[in-house]
Structure formats: structure tokens, C-alpha cells
Image (cartoon, rainbow, N blue to C red):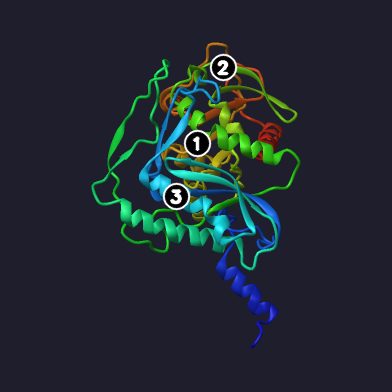
């Protein structure tokens, strides 16, 4: 086979453009056949709540009868059965934990010994099997449970349904059938990470209910600590514990075309479940964060000016906080002056965003 010259390779790479990172792209250099533990996230195509509904009282103690939980739909039960059967077809893989939510699933998989195939083949087989269940159980006009079912403080569950599920009939290059294209993997790499994963999975139903029930989203929260930094906050501080947080940082020198390309990338990552984090300073950052906000994706926004004790978000930010999809962080005290943010503050805020995403 003829090999490309160095100049031909450079020309080819230049034509291809910059490689854009993706949560659904596997980590370079990682051996996906070797012994390892993973946090896997797979989302329903279009984030349709096909797998069940969350019920219960978010204030209830874990283990109580009214504790938040997922009530699986028939399709959700089929998904659960197929996922738990992974170990039957792939004895090298152990399912440590599984949390199915109305429009996605999280699971911790332990590859106990070297596999003959890439981890992606395991996921591919699972998707193929559950697509069969999807075709069997979801027909045009089927009514599905809402992903945001709430319970009353008494513990009585309040049910709600939505209209037609609008099922897809076949996948294409950009869309799956039951599941979105690809999957997200987190690779266990540090002490305490597994415990954090387990807590996150177990807490998912409660967190979903809390998004619509907790008024503290509108109260100024002081002394919110992230690593060595301390913030005042308004909004959903549980976004800080989301397992996938992605920093949005753009050079001021980006062209309009580059900003459009980056905006599409970040919107795709948000669609797949990432929480976007940024001080939204440069034109590119502002464009991306505004587009994600308008699309209804969860955001963590850092700002230079702090909050008074009675501060509350206004306009569209108020609705975003009510829905639990916005957290505003301020590392410094409130001031009434109209100040222009300086370079040192910009660098500091971007560094804070980086730390939050680690």
C-alpha cells in the first residue's frame, strides 16, 4: 500500500479541519478490551420519556415507601432485562449498578478480565436487542408517561401522561431508533470515584423530582465550595455533582464560521447530557451559552458580580431556575457599579470553570 508523504498528510489534515472532542468518541490510547470499570450513559433518541416515570416524595428517606423511584414502562422493563443479561452473553462483564430514568440510563460496568472485543460491541448488542423490544412495544399513537411526574408532600403520587410518543421507524446516520447514536463512558481513574458514581445513580430519581419542588433554587446560597474556591450561588447546585460537566471556552479570535461549528458541537454534547460551564465572556462563549439556554439545556454560569441577600434571577433565568437547569455562581462580593471585567478576572473565572469540570 502506498504511503502518504509528509506534505500530503499535512494537506489531508488541513482539509479535514480540527478534530472536535466528543463524549461519544472513545478516549485516545485507552484499551477498551482490558480490565476496567466504566460509567455508561445511553440516552433515548430525542430524549423521549419512553422508559417509565419517576414517582415519590423527594423529601422521603431512602428506603421509605414513598421514596423517589422509577416506575418502569413495559419498554423500560425490557431494557432492564436486556441490560442485566449482558453478563450472560459477555461473562467478562459484570453489571455493578443500573439506574433507568424516563429518557436515559446510567450503569456501572466492570470488565473483570480482557474481552475478545471492544466494549462498544457489548453496547451495540444491547441496543440491537432493545430495538426489537421498541418495535414490538411502541406503536404510533402510544401514550407515554411524563419524565417529570411529581408527588405531593403527603407521599401520594401524582401521575401525568403525554401525547403520542412519535416513534421513529428506522435509524439513520444521525439518529438512532430507540437510542441516540453512540454512548458516553466515564473511566474509573481515582480513589472515591466509584462511590460517587453509585451515589449519583441512586440519587437520580430524587434529583429529577427536586428540580420542580425546591424553592431554595431561588434563594442566595452562600459558601458553596468547589475545590479551593468559594461561591455565592442561585439555582440548582446539584448541577455541580453531575458526572459530565463540560467547559465552554473560546478565543476572541474565532471567526463566525468557527463559532457556528463550536456551537453545533456543544449543543450536541448538551443534548447527550453534558452540563455546560462558562463565564460566557467572549463572543463565542456568549453565542454557545445563549444557544444552549434557549434550547433548554442545563448550564452553570459564572459571573463577576455577586448577589445581594434578596437577589433572584429575572426573566427567562427565573424559569430556568424553576426547571432546575441553571446554576449561577459568583466568587466575589456584590457591587452596584457598572464595571468592565478585566483580564485578570476573565482568567480567574475560566480557571474556576475548568476546576468545576474536573
Q: Name the residue rendered at 60%, 51% in the picture.
A: 185
Please give left or right for residue 197 compared with residue 139 in the image.
right
Count of all numbered marks drawn on residues in the image:
3
Please give left or right for residue 178 compared with residue 26 in the image.
left
**Is residue 294 positioned above or below 140 on the image?**
above
Closer to us: 148 or 68: 68
Closer to us: 264 or 182: 182
* Residue topped by disc 2: 220
Q: Position of residue 232 (x, y in %)?
A: 62, 21
The Cα–Cα distance between marks 3 and 2, rounded to whole angstroms, is: 41 Å
Answer few, some or many: residues within 10 Å of disc 3's Cα (few below 14, many 20 plus, some between 14 and 19): many
- Name the N-terminal-most of marks 3 and 2: 3
Report helix, strand or loop for mark 3: helix
Report helix, strand or loop for mark 1: loop
Answer few, some or many: residues within 10 Å of disc 1's Cα (few below 14, many 20 plus, some between 14 and 19): many
Please give left or right for residue 119 compared with residue 182 in the image.
right
- Name the N-terminal-most of marks 1 and 3: 3
Q: Are marks 1 and 3 in contact (CB under 8 Å)?
A: no
* Residue 259 at least partly seen: no
3 or 2: mark nearer the eye? 3
| Label ID, residue 202 | none
The Cα–Cα distance between marks 2 and 1, rounded to whole angstroms, is: 19 Å
Report helix, strand or loop for mark 2: loop
* Residue topped by disc 1: 298
* Residue topped by disc 3: 79
Q: Name the residue rendered at 47%, 50% in the picture.
A: 81
Image quadrant assignment for residue 230: top right
Please give left or right for residue 161 compared with residue 355 in the image.
left
Outermost residue, left side: 141
Q: Are marks 2 and 1 in contact (CB under 8 Å)?
A: no
Image quadrant assignment for residue 98: top right
Amino acid at each position: 500500500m502506498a504511503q502518504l508523504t509528509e506534505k500530503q498528510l499535512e494537506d489531508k489534515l488541513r482539509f479535514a479541519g480540527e478534530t472536535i472532542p466528543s463524549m461519544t468518541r472513545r478516549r485516545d490510547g485507552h484499551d477498551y478490551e482490558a480490565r476496567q470499570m466504566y460509567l455508561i450513559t445511553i440516552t433515548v433518541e430525542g430524549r423521549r420519556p419512553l422508559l417509565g416515570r419517576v414517582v415519590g416524595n423527594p423529601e422521603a428517606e431512602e428506603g421509605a415507601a414513598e421514596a423517589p423511584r422509577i416506575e418502569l414502562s413495559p419498554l423500560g422493563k425490557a431494557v432492564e432485562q436486556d441490560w442485566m443479561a449482558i453478563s450472560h452473553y459477555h461473562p467478562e462483564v459484570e453489571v455493578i449498578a443500573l439506574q433507568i430514568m424516563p429518557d436515559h440510563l446510567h450503569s456501572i460496568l466492570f470488565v473483570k478480565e480482557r474481552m475478545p472485543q471492544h466494549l462498544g460491541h457489548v453496547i451495540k448488542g444491547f441496543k440491537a436487542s432493545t430495538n426489537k423490544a421498541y418495535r414490538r412495544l411502541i406503536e404510533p399513537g402510544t401514550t407515554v408517561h411524563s419524565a417529570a411526574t411529581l408527588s405531593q408532600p403527603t407521599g401520594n403520587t401524582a401521575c401525568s401522561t403525554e401525547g403520542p410518543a412519535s416513534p421513529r421507524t428506522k435509524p439513520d446516520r444521525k439518529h438512532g431508533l430507540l437510542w441516540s447514536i453512540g454512548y458516553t463512558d466515564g473511566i474509573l481513574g481515582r480513589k472515591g470515584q466509584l462511590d460517587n458514581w453509585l451515589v449519583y445513580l441512586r440519587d437520580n430519581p430524587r434529583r429529577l423530582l427536586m428540580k420542580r419542588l425546591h424553592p431554595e433554587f431561588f434563594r442566595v446560597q452562600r459558601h458553596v465550595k468547589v475545590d479551593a474556591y468559594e461561591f455565592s450561588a442561585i439555582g440548582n447546585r446539584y448541577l455541580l455533582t453531575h458526572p459530565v460537566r463540560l467547559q465552554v471556552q473560546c478565543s476572541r479570535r474565532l471567526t463566525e464560521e468557527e463559532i457556528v461549528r463550536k456551537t453545533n458541537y456543544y449543543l450536541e454534547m448538551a443534548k447527550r447530557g453534558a452540563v455546560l460551564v462558562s463565564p460566557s465572556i467572549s463572543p463565542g462563549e456568549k453565542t454557545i451559552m445563549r444557544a444552549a439556554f434557549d434550547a433548554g439545556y442545563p448550564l452553570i454560569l459564572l459571573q463577576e458580580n455577586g448577589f445581594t441577600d434578596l437577589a433572584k434571577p429575572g426573566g427567562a433565568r427565573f424559569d430556568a431556575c424553576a426547571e432546575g437547569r441553571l446554576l449561577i455562581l459568583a466568587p466575589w462580593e456584590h457591587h452596584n457599579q457598572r464595571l468592565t471585567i478585566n483580564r485578570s478576572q476573565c482568567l480567574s473565572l475560566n480557571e474556576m470553570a475548568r476546576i468545576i469540570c474536573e
